[in-house]
Image (cartoon, rainbow, N blue to C red):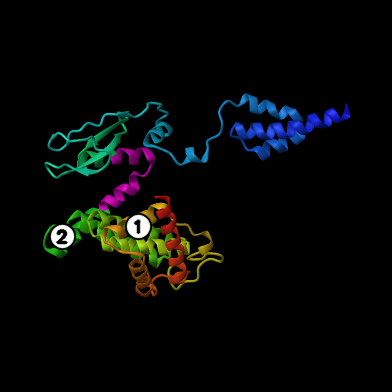
Amino acid sequence: MESFVIFSILLSYVGVTIYAKIKGKNPFLYFLLSLVIGPFAFIPLLLSNKPSSSSKDKFTITVADLAKSANGDTTTVIDKRVATCPVCSAKLKKIPGAKTKCPKCKQFMFVRTDSKTMSRVVVDAKQAELIDEEWAKISGTWESLKKEKERFIKTKSDLSEKFGAEASDADTKWALLIEDSLSHSAMQNWGHYRNTIFQMGEQLRKEGKMKHALEKFLLVCYLDTCGPNNISTPIGRQHEFGMKPFTPDSSSMAPGIISRVEKLAQKVNYDSKKLETIFIALEMQYKDAIPFSLGVQESWSQIKKQINVQRSNL
């Protein structure tokens, strides 16, 4: 009888732990609970019908989720996209899935989710801007968006005066990115600096300047292997104890960056040796501006390994 009791107790410990895991709960916490109240720990698990959110759920937040959390609205997003240009009404071969240029009028079309109707639609630039503003108000980022728009307008005006002609949006965006990169590096916010360099690479890629874009993405890779941090301390001033500009031990490289490097290298016909040559030149170009925590060869070794892994998965 005593053996049966002991066996039942042990079984309840194991059973509660396993069942907690199945229900999406913390197994360790329920194991501790079972130590206190024994098989009664099954009761809160049985009363819980919904498993807790997985890590996947946390990273798949959509605009619909944002609307629900802001308004308590449970309306699902309705797809109302059509294969028609919102600018010139030309018929398109397929429904746009993202920003694209109309083959007839050459104007850009955008895909947005209208916050008022909760419908996915194809719109022109002005409509896209209005929808973005509405979402900014819902998410509480309207003030920062407004300041950024005002900054864009002022920068474009200043550039136009300097050029003696109206500056393009691309030139304005590039000027703002340069300004941001200088600001972030001056304050040793290397994580923000890394993101700005990535945006530069994206703009160059979209403009068809593949070689220059590749250099920016390689710089992003170098920064990623060094583990960039944001310490918000001006260069030359002692930063807080324990704060470091870079921590290689916590470094990581996003697959998307490696993918961009690989694709651009193929487009400009650069082999691994050519990529390495360009990468090594980055250290000479930026060594006085960026306190890299890894030597160029050590960093390249990590990047090359990631490139090879991605190639093997193709």
Residue 138: x and y, percent? 36, 37
The amino acid marked with disc number 2 is Ser
Q: Is residue 148 magenta?
A: yes
Q: Which residues are magenta?
A: 132-150
Q: Which residue is mark 1?
A: 262
For label 2, the residue is 160
Tag 1: amino acid: Glu
> Which quadrant would the N terminus be assigned to in this image?
top right
The kind of secondary structure the magenta stretch mainly shows is helix
Residue 178: quadrant of the picture: bottom left
At a point 50% along the width and 68% down the height, the residue shown is: 239
- Mark 2, residues whose alpha carbon is within 10 Å: few (<14), some, or many (≥20)? some
Q: Is residue 150 left or right of residue 106?
A: right
Residue visible at 49% across and 59% down in the picture: 251
Residue 72 on image: x %, y % = 42, 29
Seen from the viewer's position, the closer of residues 268 and 10 is 268
